[in-house]
Amino acid sequence: MRLKATPDHSAPETVFTARSLSKVYIVGELEVRALHDVDLDIYGGEFVVLLGPSGSGKSTLLNILGGLDSPTTGKANWRDHDLVASDEAELTQYRREHVGFVFQFFNLIPSLTALENVALVAEIADDPLDPREALDLVGLADRLGHFPSQLSGGEQQRVAVARAIVKAPDVLLCDEPTGALDYDTGRLVLSTIARANAELGTTTVVITHNSAIAGMADRVLHLAGGSIARIERNPHRLAAEEIHW
Amino acid sequence: MSLLDIKLARELVSMRAQVLAIALVVGAGIAVFVASISTFYSLEASQSRFYDKSRFPNVFVTVKRAPLSIVPRLEAIPGVATIEPRIVEEVIVDWPGSRLPVSARMISLSDKHGALSRLHLRKGSAPTPGSTDEIAIGEAFAEANKVEPGGTLRAILNGRLKDFRITGIALSPEYVQTLRPGVYIPDDKFFAVAWIDREAAEGAFDMEGAFNDAVIRLAPGADASRVIEDLDRLLEPYGSVGAIERRDQPSHRFVEDELEQQRVTSITVPFVFFGVAAFLVNIALSRLVLAQREQIATLKALGYPTLPLGLHYFKLVVVIVTIGSILGLAGGYLFGHAMVLSYRNFVRFPVLDFEVTGWSLVVGIAISLAAASLGIFTAMRSVVALKPAVAMRPEAPIRFRRGVLDFLAPNGSPRAKMILRHIAGRPLQTALTTLGIAFAVPMVVLGLFWRDSVDYMMDVQFNLIERGNAVVSFSESVDADIIRDLKREHGIMKVEGQRYVPVRLRAGQRTYLTSIIGLHEGGELRVPRDLDLRPIEPAPDGITLSKRLAQRLDVALGDEITVEVMEGERRKVDVPVASIVEEMLGMSSYMEIGALNKLTGEGDVVSAAALYIEPSAIGPVSERFKSLPVIESASMKAYSIAMFFDKIAGLVLVSGAILTGFAVIIAVGVVYTSARIRYQERARELASLRVLGFTREDVSQLLFTEFMIVIAIGIPIGLVLSQYAVDLIARLHTNESFQVPAVIEPRTFTLAALIVLLTGLVSTYALRRQVYALDLVAVLKTRE
Ligand SMILES: Nc1ncnc2c1ncn2[C@@H]1O[C@H](COP(=O)(O)OP(=O)(O)OP(=O)(O)O)[C@@H](O)[C@H]1O
Ligand SMILES: [Mg+2]
C-alpha cells in the first residue's frame, strides 16, 4: 500500500462533530425514533466501532456522517463541511472526495465485474490506488473478471470493501463489513481496514455486531434505542491478527 | 471507454429485445412523420416546378366568340403580362373499342415564343405548326386506352368525321387532374384532352381570326380581381361567362385540395402517431431508469455527480433513438415512396419523385430525442430527489391494501387475491401499463378505419343518393321531350331529367364555382339526403347545399346567397338556403328543376338524365348511346365505383394499410415493453415466490393473469379513445373531393382489440421464457 502524508496523531483534531442529532421516521401513525439527541465527536485518524442491537440506529448514524441521509433535527459537520445544510451537489462532492463507504447491502453494480466495480470509484477519485491492488488486499486477485452474481455474498462484501479503500479516502465508513464473512476472511478484511486506518490515517467508523472487533478500536460507541448509551476507550488497540471470536 | 460506458454496453446487450422494441416505436413514429411531411413537400415541389416551367396561367376566361383584334386591348389591361387567345371546343370522339361515348376537349396550340400552359411531351412530338391533321393527347386518356403516338383519333367536327394522327402524348398544367365539370370521379377512359395546331382549330371550328378562350399570366404583384373586372367588361359583349382565377380552375383546385389534404395529413396523423409514440417512449424509458433506482443511488452514494449519471442514461437514449431513426428513415422512405407512387396515376406532373425533406428528419429525431430524454430526466429527478440512504434500499415493498380490488374475487383463492392486490399495490405502474396498452388500440384503429370510412362513403353516395346506375349528359340543354324518348329505349327502366347549370355561388366575400343540379320533385334516381340521411325534396323556393359547400361559403339554413349563372344571360339572383344535405363526393347544390329553369330564363329543358338500366341490357344500351349525337357522355356507376376505388380510395387505402403496419409495430413495441418492464419491476418478488415453493408455472401464470387483467382494462379504454382519434382525423381530412366519415365498424374495433390482445399474448409468452430462465439465486443475491 502506498503511503500518503500521514497527519500527526499526537494532537488529535476533531473531524466529525454531531450535536443533538435526531432522526424520526414516520410510518403510518407510528413514529420510529432511529436516533435520539446524539452528541458525538470523532477525531482525525481515529478508529471507531459502533456496537448495538439491531435497530438501534447504527446505520442511520453512519449514513448521516457519510452524507447519505439527513437528520430530522440537529447538526453534523465533517471538518468545515456542514453535512446538514449542504445541498445535494456539495454532499456528492464531499462523498466523492473524502468518503469511502462499505454498504450493509454491498450495492455493487450488477452489470460490472469485480474489477470494474472497484475501478468505477477509482475513476472519479483524485489519487486512487490501483484497483487490482485493492482487490488483492481483500484476497480477490483471482476473481477480477467475475460479475456480482457470480460471487458469493462474502466475496461481494470484499469487493465492496476494496471499492471503499481504493480511493484512499479520508474517511472510511463501513456498515458491517464482515457480516457475511468467515473467520479468516473477516480477519483479512478487518486488517485491510486497519491498515488503511494506520498507514493512511484514514478516520474509520465500523459498524459491527461482533464485540470482539471492538478490541481493534480506539473508541467503542454503544448505541441503544437511538442514543449513545456508553463510550468505551481502548488504551491498547489490538491488531486484527490478535483478535479472536 | 469509461466504466459507465461498459455498463451501458452490457445493459444494451442484455436488454436488447427491449431496446429494439422501444427503437421500433421511435422508428414507426419517425417514419410516419417523415413520410407524411416529405410526401407533401414532394408534391408541392413537383407542382411548383411544373407550373413555373410550363408557365401556368393565373386567369382563365371563356367567351362565345371574340375577334383576335380585341387582344391588344386585353393586353393593355394593367396587370396583364401575357395573354394567349385560344380555341377550345368539346367534341365527340368516335373511339372504336369503347363501350361508351367518348368526348374530347380540343385546345388550340400557339407556337409563339413564351406561350402559356406549355405542354410537357411524354412521348412523340407536338403537332407541327400549320398541320391540320396532327394532334397531341393527354397522358391520362392515352394510358387508360393504351394509345401510342402514330395512332389515330377520329373526332366529329361540325357533324363531319375527321381523322387526326396522334403525334405525341403530353401533360399540361391545366390538366394535372382531368375532371370534367360537375364530375368528381376521374373518367380517364372516356374523356380526352387534345391539342391541335391553331390553324387546324380555326379551320375545324370556323374560328378564323377569332378565339373563344383565353389564358392570362399576370404581371408580378398585379391584382387578379381588378384584371378580371376589366376582362369581364371588355369581353361581356362576346359572351364571356366571367373570368376565373387560378383557385377556381378545376385541375388546380383539385390539386390544391389534394395538397391541402396531404398537408393536413402530414400534421395530424403524425401528431397522433408521433405524439403517442413519443409518449410511450417517454414512459418506457422512465420506467427503465426507475428500475435502476438502487444502482443510481449507489453511484450517487459513491460520489458520482448527477450530471455524468444523467449523461450515462442519455447515451442509452441516444443509442435507442439512433436505432429508431435509422429504422424510421428507412421505413419513412418506403412509406413515402409508396404514397408518391399512388399519387402518380392520380395527379400528373412531369416529375413526381419522393424526396425526404431534410428538416422533417431532423425535427423527427429531435422530438424523439426530447421525448425520450424527458423520460429519463423525470425518472432521474425522482431518484435523485431521494436521499441516497433511502434510494439505495430496495424499493419500499408494495403497500398491500386490503379491499381495493378484493371485491372482484369475494370468495377467491389467496392466489386470486394476491393478483388483485399486486395490481392495486402499485397503482402508478399499473396505470402506466394500462395506458400504454390503451394507446396502442387507437393506433391500430387509425390504420384500419379508412376501409370502413370508404365503405360508408360508397354506400351513402352510390346506394342512397345516386340510386340509378347511369348518368348521361347532353351536349347542350335540350327540350325535356328527350326524356320521353329515352324512356322508350329498350332496357331503360327509369329516366329522370336533370339540369346542370354552371354557377358561381357567392356569400359575402366567399365564392365557389360549381353547378346547380336541377331535380324533379319526387325523383327516385338522385335522392338528396339530409344530415340524418333521410331523403328530402329539392325545395322549389330555395337552394339546397351540401354540408361542406355550406361550410365553405360559411352559410346556414335560411341565409341568402347569390347565384351567378355562368351561362346564357348570366343572371344574378339571391336565393335562401332551403336545406343542407349530406354528400360524400363533390360539393353539390340542388334546386327544383322548374325553379332552376325559371332562374336561368329557360323553358322546360334538361341537360342530363339519370337512368336505371336493366343490368342485362347495359351493353346494348351503351352502344345505343354512342349513336345518339345528343349524348355527349355517359357514366356508368359500376365504372365510377371502380375508378373511385382505383384512384381516390386507392390512395387512402394504401396509406391506411401502411399506417396499420406501423400501428402494429407500435402496439407490439408498447405492449412488449410494458410487459417486460412490469416483469423487471417484479423480478425479485417473483423470485421470492419461487423460493417459497411456487412453481415456474405458478409464477408465469400469476404474471400472465395479472397482465391479462391489465390488458382487459386497457383495451376498452383504447376503444373509447379510438373514437376520439378517428373523429379528429376525419374532421381534419374532409376536403372538396370527398369527406372522410368518422365511421368505425364493429369489425374494426374487434380486429384492433384482437391485434392488441395478440401482441399481449405474444409478449407474455416471451416473458414466460424469462420466468423459466429466472436464476433465483442470482436475483436474490444481487441487489439492483
Ligand atoms: N426508511 C425507514 N423507514 C422507517 N423506519 C426506518 C427506516 N430506516 C430505518 N428505520 C428504522 O430506524 C431504526 C434504526 O435503523 P438502522 O438501520 O439505523 O438500525 P441499525 O442499528 O443499523 O440496525 P441493523 O443492525 O439491523 O442494521 C430501526 O428501528 C428501523 O426500523
Ligand atoms: Mg444497519
Image (spheres, coloured by chain):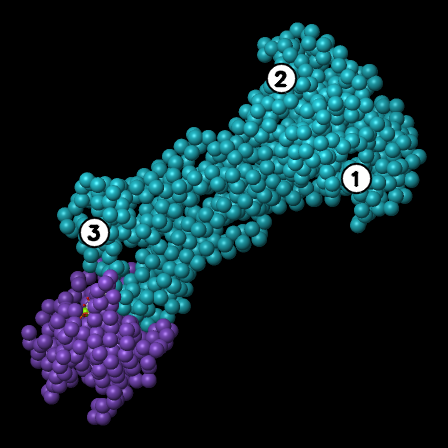
Q: Earlier in the sequence, mark 1 or mark 2?
A: 1
- Outermost right residue: B69
Q: Quadrant of residue A137?
A: bottom left
Q: What colour has chain A?
A: purple
Label 3 residue near ligand 1, CB within 8 Å: no
Q: Residue at x 18, y 41 (%)?
A: B413
Q: What colour has chain B?
A: cyan
* Mark 3 Cα shell of 10 Å, populated few (<14), some (14-19), many (≥20): many
- What amino acid is at disc 1? Val
Whether residue A30 is visible, yes or no, is yes
Output the chain of dot 2. Answer: B
- Outermost bottom residue: A11
> What's the mark number on residue B483?
none
Label 2 residue near ligand 1, CB within 8 Å: no
Q: Earlier in the sequence, mark 3 or mark 2?
A: 2
For disc 1, the marked residue is B59
Q: Earlier in the sequence, mark 1 or mark 3?
A: 1
Q: CA distance from mark 3 to mark 2?
A: 73 Å
- What amino acid is at disc 3? Ala
For disc 3, the marked residue is B687
Please provide percent x and percent y for residue B541: 72, 26
